[in-house]
Image: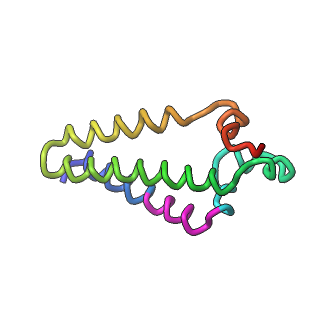
Amino acid sequence: MNIWAIICLILAVFFGIISIVFALLKEKGTILISGFNTISKKEREKYDKKKMSIDMRNSLLLWSIILFLGTILGHFASKYCAIIAIIIWLSIFLKDVHIDSEKPFDKYRKP
């Protein structure tokens, strides 16, 4: 197995485990979301924690699936498939990164 497939496998397992943690913790898992844990408890009540947790779980699961497919294709087809999977994951990951701590949670505000 080449190094790129191994990297994909390690990341896929890591993100898969974290998505399971979010699935088990449900609304309590929102405290694990970066930036949300820095908001005061009073402010946290203004957000839909259930939807936030479900979206985070789904994102982590998507990342895990992409990287797992990269592992399989990287092992059986070509190492370049694993590299492409990492690039796809990185582009999706960077799309969701925000500098401002309030902006990423705007879509979860309760009316």
Extreme residue toward the bottom, this view: 24
Query: Seen in the image, is 90 located left or right of residue 24?
Result: left
Measured as percent of width and height from the top left, residue 80 is found at: 20, 37
Q: Main secondary structure of the magenta part?
A: helix
User: In which quadrant will I find the N terminus?
Assistant: bottom left
Q: Residue at x 50, y 32 (%)?
A: 95
Residues 1 and 13: in front is 13
Residue 12 image-quadrant placement: bottom left
Measured as percent of width and height from the top left, residue 50 is found at: 65, 57
Q: Which residues are magenta?
A: 16-26
Magenta residue check for 17: yes
Measured as percent of width and height from the top left, residue 109 is found at: 74, 43
Query: Seen in the image, is 1 located left or right of residue 37?
Result: left
Extreme residue toward the right, this view: 42
Q: Residue at x 32, y 55 (%)?
A: 9
Q: Residue at x 44, y 54 (%)?
A: 61
Residues 9 and 54: in front is 54
